[in-house]
Image (cartoon, helix red, strand yellow):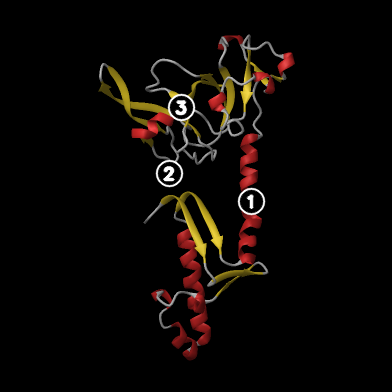
């Protein structure tokens, strides 16, 4: 009954792929493995039955381990041909899934800097993964980016930008692949708001970077005459399983940076 967000499975020499066929070898399992206890004795008594039972046990072992991850499974094999076999069919699927989301077009007109009227109905378009390491220099020249022309009701202002949100961690508010409007360097209280956060200790499972988009909650305490954050909780708002709160506290709070505040999903 054990389930994890992600599981890693190391495949030993008891299970290899040869010419696309799974080949098992109970003799290559650990001598302390009781699941194939008595295997050598049975080989002498009834070789065909012993091989069939051992084959089932080995395959079932790896099947069980590989299905414990609710969000994903990482596989490594000690055998080179087996590694290539798994890589050959897993990489195209992963690439296809990512491409399906990333191929979702911005719903409004996209132009280059020369054609835009900056912040007069136009805001820059960011690739969050590409700029993940650059937000500490957020005021870098925006001429390098494409710009999105937004409808008048958005009342654009300096500091706003558009970016795509990938993943299911906020799917009750932001659909996977949605293009969203953010306000950079938001002031005031962030409690209860959806924010784009950067922290060196974050490795977001949806985008693989140190950036994440979550609902912001903070617990404060008095320090002298002022309230200071004691703990920040970044909460997913999702119907998907496997997402948990990210809790940042103590010295780690000094490196926490709220890059932007979610404004709206572009429709």
Q: Nearer the viewer, mark 3 or mark 2?
A: 3
Rendered residue at 43%/44% (across/down): 242
Q: Secondary structure at mark 3?
A: strand
Q: CA distance from mark 3 to mark 2?
A: 25 Å
User: Along the polypeptide, which appears first: circle 3 or circle 1?
Assistant: 1
Give the label on residue 91, or none: 1
Residue identified by numbered label 3 = 257
Q: CA distance from mark 3 to mark 1?
A: 33 Å
Residue identified by numbered label 2 = 242
Placement of 155 over or under 87, stated as above or below = above
Q: Secondary structure at mark 1?
A: helix
Q: Secondary structure at mark 2?
A: loop
Rendered residue at 53%/31% (across/down): 175
Rendered residue at 63%/11% (across/down): 121
How many residues crowd around disc 1 within 10 Å: few (fewer than 14), some, or many (20 or more)? Answer: few
User: Along the polypeptide, which appears first: circle 1 or circle 2?
Assistant: 1
The one of 29 and 68 positioned closer to us in this rendering = 29
The one of 39 and 219 positioned closer to us in this rendering = 219
Q: Where is residue 150 drawn, in percent x and y?
A: 62, 15
How many residues crowd around disc 3 within 10 Å: few (fewer than 14), some, or many (20 or more)? Answer: some
């Amino acid at each position: 009954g054990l389930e994890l967000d992600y599981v890693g499975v190391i495949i030993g020499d008891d299970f290899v792929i040869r010419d696309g066929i799974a080949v098992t070898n109970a003799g290559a399992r650990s001598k302390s493995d009781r699941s194939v206890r008595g295997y050598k004795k049975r080989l002498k008594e009834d070789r065909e039955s012993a091989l069939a039972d051992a084959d089932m046990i080995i395959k079932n072992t790896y099947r069980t381990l590989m299905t414990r991850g609710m969000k994903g499974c990482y596989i490594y094999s000690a055998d080179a041909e087996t590694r290539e076999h798994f890589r050959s069919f897993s990489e195209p699927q992963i690439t296809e899934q990512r491409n399906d989301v990333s191929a979702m077009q911005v719903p409004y007109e996209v132009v280059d800097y020369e054609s835009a009227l900056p912040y007069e109905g136009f805001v820059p378009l960011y690739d969050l993964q590409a700029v993940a390491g650059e937000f500490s220099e957020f005021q870098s020249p925006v001429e390098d980016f494409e710009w999105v022309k937004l409808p008048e009701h958005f009342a654009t202002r300096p500091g706003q930008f558009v970016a795509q949100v990938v993943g299911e961690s906020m799917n009750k508010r932001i659909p996977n692949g949605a293009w969203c409007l953010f306000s950079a360097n938001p002031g005031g209280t962030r409690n209860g708001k959806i924010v784009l956060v950067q922290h060196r200790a974050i490795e977001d499972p949806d985008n693989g970077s140190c950036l994440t988009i979550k609902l912001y909650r903070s617990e404060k305490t008095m320090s002298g005459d002022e309230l200071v954050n004691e703990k920040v909780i970044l909460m997913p708002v999702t119907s998907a399983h496997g997402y948990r709160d990210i809790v940042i506290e103590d010295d780690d709070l000094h490196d926490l940076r709220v890059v932007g505040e979610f404004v709206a999903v572009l429709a």
